Image: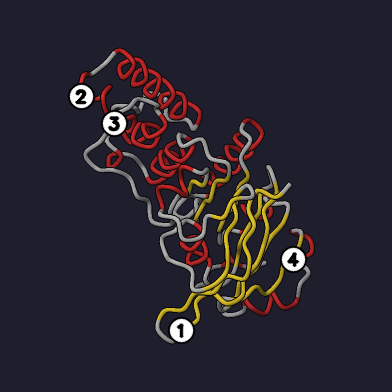
Amino acid sequence: MSRLEVNNLYKSFGGVKAIEDVSFQVNDRQVVGIIGPNGAGKTTAFNLLTGVYPLDQGSVILDGKEISGLPQYQIAQMGMARTFQNIRLFRGLNCLENVMTAADPYSGYNLLDVFFFSGNKRKREREVRDLSMHYLERVGLAGYENEKPENLSYGLQRKLELARALATNPKILLLDEPAAGLNPSEVQGFIGLIRELHLEFTFSILIIEHRMEVIMGLCSNIFVLNFGKLLASGTPAEIQENRSVTEAYIGEEDEACSI
């Protein structure tokens, strides 16, 4: 069953074609990777899927429903959550409050409940708080709920961003360079955590990552972008043996990018 269908995406900025005729599919509970050299269009593709940028052409279908052109908050409410290459957490709020901001739109109380601070609102706020605590614990942040994000290590901030994404109850989770800035031990811990979450929850995962140990260790299928176009697709083994993919990476300075 298809969870996400991406059909013939195009996006230009001025005269530069950032994405050109890109199509791919993510099935139910599948973990799929997107790789490519720097500047290949990977994050631009994520921004198109999540409504950050409008499409020039093409369509994005989530669970059989067209989401192209919808505002970002509606796309999130329909079941698409993401993390960012550059971590975006709310400074001034503690870790628990950061996760609660993601869960609160799904709390179910209405405007009258807010005005009169009704029993329903108090009940739902307790439920949101308890659920947010559960997600913090699930990613390994138990005991950090009152800490400010800026006081956490980079690896723990990555986990907090993941907990906040989980709180939206996604159908598909988009991870943009989630292992960036992590040391080798943290990378292995992250791979294990994603495997556990994938087994526990029902969402599919679409992941952009330069570190090949993450992609090869998690993904059943990989799509390769180069200069905004789909260069190749296949299983990890097929991608490793693809000469066009190897050639696309020649000149990359980061050894973690090697196939």
> Mark 2 to mark 3: distance in Å?
30 Å
Amino acid of disc 4: Gln
Q: Earlier in the sequence, mark 4 or mark 1?
A: 1
How far apart in space, not on screen, are marks 2 and 1 (Cα)?
Answer: 50 Å
Judged from this view, the residue extending furthest toward the bottom is 15
- Callouts 3 and 4 close, C-beta under 8 Å: no
Earlier in the chain: of badge 1 and badge 3, it is 1
Query: Which of the two discs, 3 and 4, labels the residue nearer the N terminus?
Result: 3
Residue type indicated by callout 3: Glu
Q: Is residue 96 left or right of residue 46?
A: left
Tag 1 secondary structure: strand
Task: Spot the residue most to the front.
Answer: 112
Task: Residue under label 1, please give it.
Answer: 16
Q: Give the Cα separation between the discs numbered 3 and 4.
A: 42 Å
Q: CA distance from mark 1 to mark 3?
A: 43 Å
Q: Quadrant of residue 209?
A: bottom right
At label 2, which amino acid type do we have? Phe
* Circle on res. 240: 4
The residue mark sitting in front, 2 or 4, is 2
Quadrant of the frame with the C terminus: bottom right
Residue 108 sits in quarter: top left
Percent of width and height locating residue 34: 61, 61
Residue type marked 1: Val
N-term-proximal mark, 2 vs 4: 2
| Gap between marks 4 and 1 measured at Cα | 29 Å
Residue 190 in the image, given as x and y percentages of width and height:
55, 42
Q: In the visual, does 118 lie left or right of 44? A: left
Sequence-wise first label, 2 or 3? 2
Q: Which residue is mark 3?
A: 147
Depicted 12 relative to depicted 235: above or below: below
In the rendered image, which residue does mark 2 sit on?
115
